[in-house]
Amino acid sequence: MLKNMAFGVALMAGSAQAAEVPKNVIFFIGDGMGPAYTTAYRYYQADSQVSQVTDTVFDRLLIGSASTFPHDETVVTDSAAGATALATGTKSYNGAIGVDAHKQPLDSMLVQAKSMGWHTGVIATSHVNHATPASFVAHADSRRNYQEIAEQFYSRRLKEDQPLVDLILGGGQRYFPMEQDQLGSKMVNWGYQYADKLTQLDSLTRLPALGLFAPKQLPYAVDSDQPKRLSAMVSTGLRLLSQSDTPFFLMVEGSLIDWCGHDNDIACAMKEMADFAGALEVAEAFAQERGDTLVVFTADHSTGGLTLGAGGEYRWEAEQVKQTGASLRTITDALLNQPQEQFPQILARFLGFELTQGELGELAKVSKEEEALRWKLASILSGHSYTGWTTSGHTAVDVPLGAMGPGSERFRGHLDNTEIAKALKQMIR
């Protein structure tokens, strides 16, 4: 009760200042990005050299924290329930997409923005019909109903002559096929400008725009020749959304931070964090120049139980993380079914340090079992940087909350994820 009263007082105090009402809202969600991820990124940027540690964009914008628990008693949320809470302001069950605990539809802040005449957009490094972006656009009993969710990106409209989502950038080509009379081709025929390669982002010149750059999720940044793909998509999105004087709401998800966390892959996670930070910096610069745009960042939950420092040692070696040049999945594929004598040569393509003979022997024992090999690699490479993990799943720790621009003071202190949504929805008018 006291917490809710304090939140109400903060909202009333904020409403007294006209400058608090933003014209545009950009909402960043780092999927799985608990506080250890933003901390690790700070030291990753500095190679663990104390003299080189500087604030990151997460430090500059940080003003609070958020709880993430779902509707039920499990305390630990999944991305669907977490995103539904962030999108609608209502708790739901794990797996829910834009529906409440009784499977009744909930309208998101994106839908509210469109009803107010705003332009809308979603950008993600996963497929765009994945849990987080889906919760801002669709209603589904299960997050696994990918095709049903994809169809709603086209079929849901508040007005017949206007799309619900004006800008869609990310992965998911397989769910929006371009064959005649299929979903993707229907959207293009209806009026969406389409690009299917990141190198074609500049070819998108107007809204509505649809850019799908992979069959499902985009490649991991650490494996990609375009590691700043989220930054590029956000730059394009802001260029298109700001072409007119129409207000806009844009949701941006750093989706694959979570996927790397599930694999306990610290090098993969830090490359995703670097791209997410770069994208947030693009929005930060946009908001600073404009003065009328609210930027908020948070996470839906934390993944993996990441800790900095492990094995009883008081240290964390970011330099070792930077010397890992591929995801665990890519390294595993290269080692699978290969003889042990080939391991050093293969690993030299991906690692800037050598493994011990004992470590090579441990890998050889599981070299014919893909999952066992990947987890053994995760253990060994995490050990080199003194990175700790508690799970391959999610945890219930509070997540960071940051904001800048008109209305940012409403996010100070500790909020529940539903309170973030309610504050944003109050400002979309």
Image: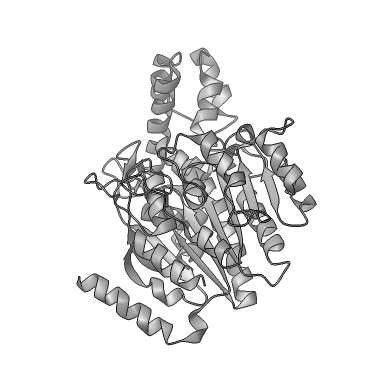
Left or right of 239? Residue 54 is: left
Q: Nearer the viewer, residue 308 or 107?
A: 107
| Quadrant of the snapshot with the N terminus | bottom left
Q: Is residue 253 visible?
A: yes
Q: Nearer the viewer, residue 60 or 124?
A: 124
In which quarter of the view is residue 245 placed? Answer: bottom right
Left or right of 192? Residue 134 is: left
- Residue ID at (47%, 69%): 403
In this view, 61 is above or below 20: above
The percent coordinates of residue 340 (x first, y second) are 49, 15
The percent coordinates of residue 415 (x first, y second) are 32, 65
- Residue ID at (38%, 20%): 362
- Please, which colouring scheme is shown? one colour
Left or right of 285? Residue 417 is: left
In this view, 410 is above or below 367: below
**Total residue callouts:** 0
Q: Is residue 56 visible?
A: no
The percent coordinates of residue 15 (x first, y second) are 42, 83
The residue positioned farthest toward the front in the image shown? 160
